Image (cartoon, rainbow, N blue to C red):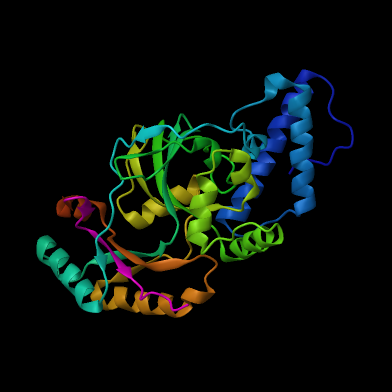
Amino acid sequence: MPAARSVPPRGATAAAGRVEALRASIRDADYRYYVLDAPDVSDAEYDAWMRELAELEAAHPELTSPDSPTQRVGGAPSDAFEAVTHRLPMLSLNNAFSDDEVEAFDRRVRDALGIEIVRYACEPKFDGLAISLVYENGRLAVGATRGDGTTGENVTANLRTIGAIPLALPDGAPPRLEVRGEVVMLRRDFDRLNAAQAAKGEKTFANPRNAAAGSLRQLDPRVTASRRLTFLAYGIGEVDWVRHPPPATHSTLMDWLVSLRFPVTRERTLAAGLAGILDYYRRLGERRASLPFEIDGVVYKVDDHAQQRALGFVSRAPRFAVAHKFPAEEL
């Protein structure tokens, strides 16, 4: 943690060292806050670091970097979002609305693999906006919405304002890495936003998903920056695996993403067979209203990547995964 300073460092060399120290401390604080859910610095101390960093970058423009934490504040408005073609389509999942439909899914998987018990990775199905984050040489290059699965909208400037999204990755990350996940608005932040909207006499949002989508698709990134959005990773797209082999399972892939400082839900688990996944569904359903974010079901994925490849895809959905939806909540 950098020592507190009352007088800015003099000279380019000293300033450069201080800038790097501040950036490292701010990134570590972001990681502890968004990924570990264990903040260890006060808001006042964090804000002081950000102010000092902004002052140093203003005094030494040559030290400004696109991946600096100060660049999250949002740039100038744009006229429209450019289209982005996903190199690997962002597929949707087939839905299951009953235990019988989940049983049929599990039976198809077991029959195709020729095994009796399948190990599944179980996760909440977030009720937010699916996005793709492309990193090149460890730096966030492009962020896009899912769109129709083939073509989305370039919302990079807006995504850069979300503190949970790393702008730079640790050393050793693949030269090209596409991370996929969901932008969501936590319940507490949704309540704050609607209270602020109502106080200004402006339209309120119907639910956190609408608030997240509306906030992310603002043409002015400064509006997005003023809203409290967060991000949860749930998978990958295109990756250049030149430095190490890919993880063998979905669960180890999620652990690997955490090591790269991406936030991943703590509500994930591994379950064996039909009984295990239905038990997860019921237990999470009982806690649904108390979760910090809204979910509309759970997702079951065959954990083993070799088994996933053997199962393959049908139409625009994988055979190795299904979304088990919750009944609609009564208002």
Marks counted in the figure total 0
Of residues 34 and 251, the one nearer the viewer is 34
Of residues 162 and 19, the one nearer the viewer is 162
Query: Can the viewer see residue 261?
Result: no
Question: Which quadrant of the view contains residue 283?
Answer: bottom left
Is 108 in the magenta? Answer: no
Residue 6 x %, y %: 89, 37
Q: Which residues are magenta?
A: 315-331
Is 328 in the magenta? Answer: yes
Of residues 326 and 211, the one nearer the viewer is 211
In the orientation shown, which residue stands out farthest toward the right?
6
> Residue at the spot x=73%, y=44% of the render?
1
- Give the vertical position of 288 relative to 75 (above or below): below
Q: Is residue 13 left or right of residue 219?
A: right
Query: Can the viewer see residue 292?
Result: yes
Q: Is residue 230 left or right of residue 127?
A: right
Residue 223 x %, y %: 62, 44
Residue 140 x %, y %: 50, 34
> Residue at the spot x=57%, y=46% of the render?
162
Residue 90 x %, y %: 31, 46
Q: Is residue 31 left or right of residue 4?
A: left
Question: Which quadrant of the view contains residue 153?
Answer: top left
